[in-house]
Each structure stands twice: as structure tokens, then as C-alpha cells.
Image (cartoon, rainbow, N blue to C red):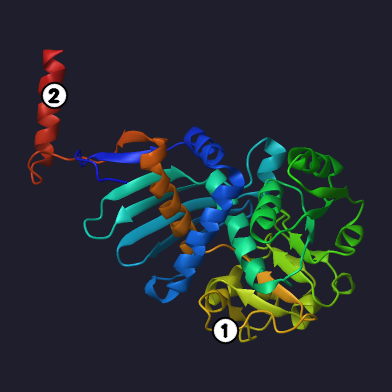
Amino acid sequence: MTAHSNLNIVPFVSVDHMMRLVLKVGIETFLTELAAVIEDDFRRWEQFDKTPRIASHSKEGVIELMPTSDGTLYGFKYVNGHPKNTKEGRQTVTAFGVLSDVGNGYPMLLSEMTILTALRTAAMSAVAAKHLARANAKTMAIIGNGAQSEFQALAFKAIVGVSELRLFDIDPSATERCARNLAGNGFAIKSCSSSQEAVEGADIITTVTADKQYATILSDNMVGPGVHINAVGGDCPGKTELHKDILLRSDIFVEYPPQTRIEGEIQQLDADYPVKELWEVIAGKREGRQSERTITLFDSVGFAIEDFSALRYVRSKLQETGLYVDLDLLADPDEPRDLYGMLLRCEAKLGEA
């Protein structure tokens, strides 16, 4: 996207713009292209500033900032996680993000990221499975059929080739809605009455529940050799989905260990328990799956580089689509040192009106 001549103007992508952008590009194309940008950025992982996200926890949920920079661009996301919100008619997760120029500090993009986070989480999950699941994986169980489930299914179809879904949620209406939303997208879909039924014959198991608690969505006897587990729902201290014994049997891959040890499934393990970093697999520095019988586990909590990639991808689409508005966000006086003068000129104009 070309630079704006008016320095106080920042492109803003609203929720409506984001929806239109996804539909214009096509959701599976959007997910595939976004996944490619994520892989590109993971291959240059060592260039990025990295820190665990800055979190403010309460008994109700968490509010977090997720910052990173590659030395040229800086990005951050504001995101919350409040599982109780669904009972009040609100989203569990909401978010917005900013992409800025490191050279001058000026924002280059402000964007909604509630929808975009769902898309980048699904794309990231599918990228991990592309590198870790068995090559012929076609069947995926999705346990937890909330706001993430359709995005996960479509990403795994587009990027991994999944064609069969086995769905389960403790709320049957959520499973019904998910199956209805995904109808006509080329899946064979089975709605299951238990998590045990859902995992039968599954090559990939995705757990994506919302409750903020230590839970056992998967027990050890439910996971057979060769399965790839995409553990998405455990994303804050005190919130897990897998029985500890599953972790001890699995080859565990994470985004950024200092963050995942606080928020992921591996918070159940000793602080020095060995895990592998996914970026090394994507960059060709480490092997992924060791054998057809290995249980691979992607302990996904989300990391700032993925949001950086998502913002970078969205910004690349703005000029061709025009799906943004100019936001008068930054004070930009004619003389940089005369900020007060802007107030005086505004006062004079108001007096003339």
C-alpha cells in the first residue's frame, strides 16, 4: 500500500471491512495466503523481538497486549479472553491491532482483530498440522464447537486436505450450528454424542473449548498412535484441556516456550520439560514428525508474530480492495514543534463558523 501524503491519516479496517475483505478474497484463499505469510515470518523468527504477552488477569478473564517487531515494522494486538461473556451475549475474545513504521513510529494500520484472530489462529493450526500430522490425514475431530470451530475446519481443508469432520460439544446446539454453517463446503460431517465418539478414527484432534479451568477434554486412553493433536483452547494460566499423561506420551511443539509454559498445556509439566519450537521445523532446522506412530502435539496459545503476519497480510490487500477508511488519528501540525498552535488555529476556525 502506498504511503499517505497526509501524515495524520491512518487506514482503519473495521469489522465490516474485514468481513467484506474475507468474502472478496474467499475464505479458503484468505486462510491459505495468510498461512503462507505466517510461514514466511516463522522462517525469519530470529529477526523478531520476542516476549511473553503482557497480561492483566482477573477472576473473570484476561486482557493482554501482544507486541513484536522485525526491526522494520512494529505490531501489537490488544486482546481479551472472558469465557463468561457468551452467557451475556458477548464474544469470549475480542481484539484490535496496530502496525507501525519502526523508522518514524507512525502507525500504518489500525484494524479490527476479532475476526482476524479467528482466521490467524486457524491458519496457524493448519500450518502446524501441515508440518506435523501424517501426510494422509483426512479426518479431524473438533471438540468444542464454538466461535473458532468453522475457521479451524476450513483452514484444515484448504491447507492440510481434511475432508471428514467429527464434531462434539457439551452443548448440542453448538454442534448443530457448526454443522449447519459448514454444510456445502465439501465435508463429510458427523455430529457425535461424546468426545470419545468424536475421536474414533480421527487422524487429527482439535480441542478448542472456552471454559477457564483445568479440564480433561481428552483422556489418555482416547489418543492412539500416530494422532496429531491441535490443542487450541488452553491459552491462559489455570486453563488446560488435556490429561497430563497425554503430554508425557507426545512429541510437543510450541510457538514460544516462555509464554507456552505459563499459558499452554505444558503448564502442567516441570519448567524444564523438553519441548520443541515449531519455527525450527518450518525453517528446516529440525525434523517434525518422527514416525507414523508418533503422537504429535501442537500446544497452541497464539503468539505476537502470528498477529504481526496477519496485520501485514491485511495491509497488503488494502490498495487493491479499498476496504478501509482514512482515520484522522494523529496530530500533525504544520510546524512539528507548534502543537499548541493547532489548537489556536482550530479556535479561530470555530470563531469564524
Residue 96: numbered disc: none
Kindly tell me whether residue 314 is visible in this rendering. yes
Q: What distance separates the C-alpha of mark 2 from that of mark 1?
A: 63 Å
Identify whether 182 is placed above or below 268: above
**The C terminus - image quarter:** top left
Q: How many marks?
A: 2
Write down the residue under mark 1: 286
Q: Position of residue 148 (x, y in %)?
A: 67, 50
- Amino acid type indicated by mark 2: Glu
Q: Is residue 257 left or right of residue 130?
A: left
Q: Is residue 5 left or right of residue 25?
A: left
Q: Position of residue 203 (x, y in %)?
A: 80, 67
- Amino acid type indicated by mark 1: Arg
Q: Nearest the camera: 347 or 199?
A: 199
| Circle 2 SS class | helix
Residue 347: numbered disc: 2
Q: Is residue 326 left or right of residue 263?
A: left
Q: Nearest the camera: 320 or 45?
A: 320
Identify whether 81 is placed above or below 24: below
Q: Nearest the camera: 278 or 184?
A: 184
Q: Nearest the camera: 8 or 181?
A: 181
Q: Residue at x 39, y 57 (%)?
A: 75
**Of labels 2 and 1, the one closer to you:** 1
Upstream in sequence: badge 2 or badge 1: 1
| Circle 1 SS class | loop
Q: Residues within 10 Å of mark 2 (few under 14, many from 20)?
A: few
Q: Quadrant of residue 233?
A: bottom right
Q: Position of residue 325 (x, y in %)?
A: 36, 33
